[in-house]
Amino acid sequence: MTIHPTALADQRQAACADALSRLKAAAAGPGARLSYEPDHPWLTEQLRLITLSLTIGGAKFCEHLNAHPASPRVVHAHAWTPGVLVCPDCTKFPYLIRDNTCDRCHRHSRRGLWTTIAAHGPVLFTYALCRTCHTEVDGPA
């Protein structure tokens, strides 16, 4: 069964609105740091890779997304699980950063990490950075 282009566009618009709503809800949390329009080359590249995996294949999905692959919806991607996209029900908040390894420079941070969520259409991308990378990518704390 083929979805009509107008219906597909409506579903994508609804998924983007849902993602924005979820992003704003996350902003209410303590210490939240959100990005609406990522402009750092590292972050832009991460979002490009996610889009590429969705477009040409290669992404892995949770069982809920596999059940309805053609329907646009909010998906979560995490820098610490590259190539894996999950639905909101399979995303655990707050995130437990186990090893304090920066997603950008891959160094261990004794001082902890800054977790940020960036919205890219219906994709919510979460990453954790050391203080140095956080300041460079997201600006001063």
Image (spheres, rainbow, N blue to C red):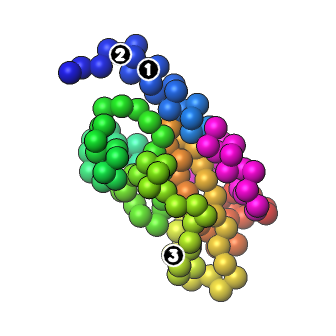
Residue in the image at 70% along x and 82% along y: 111
Extent of the magenta region: 21-45
- List x then y, in percent, for residue 105: 54, 72
Upstream in sequence: badge 2 or badge 3: 2
Can residue 59 be seen by looking at this rendering? no
Separation of residues labelled 2 and 1 (CA atoms) = 6 Å
Circles 2 and 1, Cβ within 8 Å, touching? The answer is: yes
In terms of secondary structure, where does tag 3 sit?
loop
Which residue is denoted by mark 2 in the rendering?
5
Say which of marks 1 and 3 sits in front: 1
Q: Residue at x 28, y 45 (%)?
A: 66
Disc on res. 98? none
For label 1, the residue is 9
Residue for badge 3: 106
Q: Local crowd at mark 1 within 10 Å, few (<14), some, or many (≥20)? A: few
Instruction: Identify which amino acid the numbered label 1 is placed on.
Output: Ala
Q: Quadrant of residue 100?
A: bottom right
Relative vertical location of residue 115 with respect to residue 101 in this rendering, above or below: above
Label 3, residues with CA under 10 Å away: few <14, some 14-19, many ≥20: few
CA gap between label 1 and label 3 equals 38 Å
As helix, strand or loop, the secondary structure at mark 1 comes to helix
Which label's residue is closer to the chain start, 1 or 3? Answer: 1
Q: Nearer the viewer, residue 58 or 14?
A: 14
Q: Position of residue 102 (x, y in %)?
A: 56, 73
Residue 20 x %, y %: 62, 37
Dividing the picture into quadrants, the one containing residue 93 is bottom right
Dot 3 amino acid type: His
